[in-house]
Each structure stands twice: as C-alpha cells, then as structure tokens.
Amino acid sequence: MLSIFIKELNSFFSSLIAYIVVGVFLAILGLIMWVFPDTSLLNYSYATLDQLFDMAPVIFLFLIPAITMRSFAEEQQTGTIEILSTKPLSDTEIVGGKFLANFALVIFSILPTLIYYYSVYKLGAPEGNLDSGAIMGSYIGLILLGGGFAAIGIFASALTNNQIVAFIISVFFCFLFYWGFYFFSKLPIFVGKVDDIVQMLGIEYHYLSISKGVVDSRDVVYFLSFILAFLGLTVTVLEKRKW
C-alpha cells in the first residue's frame, strides 16, 4: 500500500495536477471571501469563516472528481492495470494506496486556508473574536467530507476506462449523497413521517452537525463507514474484472 501511495503522490507532484488543484481551490475561495461584494468578509460587521465552509463542498463537488477520475480509468485505458495486478499487492492495498494519495492531496489543498483563519482572527474586533471551536469542527468536517468524496471518486474511476465518464459519474454520486437525501426528505411521502431519518442518510446532515463545533462520534462513524463502504465497492469492482 505504501508503494502505491508514494507512486501516486509522485505522479501528482511531478505534474501540474497538485498545483492546479490547490491553486484553483484557493483562488475560488479567495474571490468569494475577499472580492465578491455579496460574500466578502470586508463587508461583514463580524468576523466569520462561514463562507469558506459553505462554499467548500460546492467546490469539492467538482474538484475532487477531477483529481480522482484518473486513478483507475487511466490505468485501464493504458493497460497498466494488468501490470499492477501482477505485483505482490492485493486489490485492497491498491485501492487503499490510491485513496490515501488522493485524500492527502485534498488535505494539502485545505491546509493553506488556515491563512484565511489567521487573517480573520487578526481582523476581529477585539482581535481573536472568533468561535474557534466551531471553526475547528468545521475543518474536521471538511476533511471528512473530502475523504468521502475521494472514496466516491475512486469508485467511479474503477467503473470505466474513460476519465470524463468517471468524472461525470463521480459528480453525480457526490451530489446525490450530499444534497440528494435532503431533497428526497421533502417529498410528500416522507414529510412528517421519516423525513429526519432520510436527511440523516445524507452527508450534508453530518457535515453541518460537525460544523457546529461539537464533534459527535456518530457523525465521525458515519463518515468512516461511508468511506469504507465505497472503498469496499471499489475492491469488489476490481475483483469482478478478474472473474
């Protein structure tokens, strides 16, 4: 698993992929937080990072599938997946190594946003007038969300040898599991009956819960189970090809 992890990371950082991902993520957030009048922090009467955590899932919806779409699709397209399969590595180790590399890149793109936290901390009146607990909870939620989207992207990439198709499938599943259950809960058949339960099946419910600053073990277990479920599905897809 470690060899796959290092190989994937080297692949990211030896090309422009990692730098483009981080640059695009920070540029979009920077414009939203500091430039666009409707969302600029400079036009707010209080210090907050709500814009960052509200918009990050929307950006991740497209950014993470763009990162993960090549994971297995490229290997299948070039035929290197057969060479990879002959190495003394199990499918679980291959999937785990690729997931960890993509997840590491997601975390690497989140870390520079701490500059925004420092800036807002300094801009507060008085200085440091921020709900740091809620912000730290939001960062934990954002990292777990990135892991969930990365797991979906890895799974989508294993389904096809076309990177564009993998991207589209990944975006669809990310949207479905993040916002889909909220919209489903508003259907007449669920309203007033099990709408709360339906919402709890979606990622957004647990992400918003952690963002309040209280890291509930149930939310963490949900994210970890979600990630493991999609990685397990990816392993199953790879094994099915052998059958």
Image: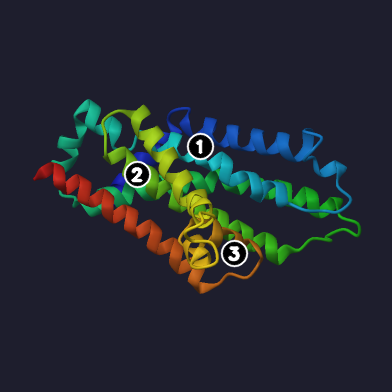
Q: Give the residue at x 32% y 49%.
A: 97
Q: Are marks 1 and 3 in contact (CB under 8 Å)?
A: no
8 with respect to 236 (left or right):
right
193 with respect to 55 (left or right):
left
Alpha carbon distance from label 3 to label 2: 24 Å
> Of 131 and 191, which appears nearest the observer?
191
Query: Which quadrant is home to the C terminus?
Result: top left
Alpha carbon distance from label 1 to label 3: 22 Å
Asked whether the viewer can see residue 36, the reply is: yes
Q: Secondary structure at mark 2?
A: helix
- Residue lying furthest left: 243
The residue to which callout 1 is attached is 63
Q: Secondary structure at mark 3?
A: helix
Q: Give the residue at x 78% y 53%.
A: 48
Residue 73 figure quarter? top left
83 with respect to 108 (left or right):
left
Q: Earlier in the sequence, mark 3 or mark 2?
A: 2
* Residue 210: image tag: 3
Alpha carbon distance from label 2 to label 1: 13 Å
- Residue lying furthest front: 188
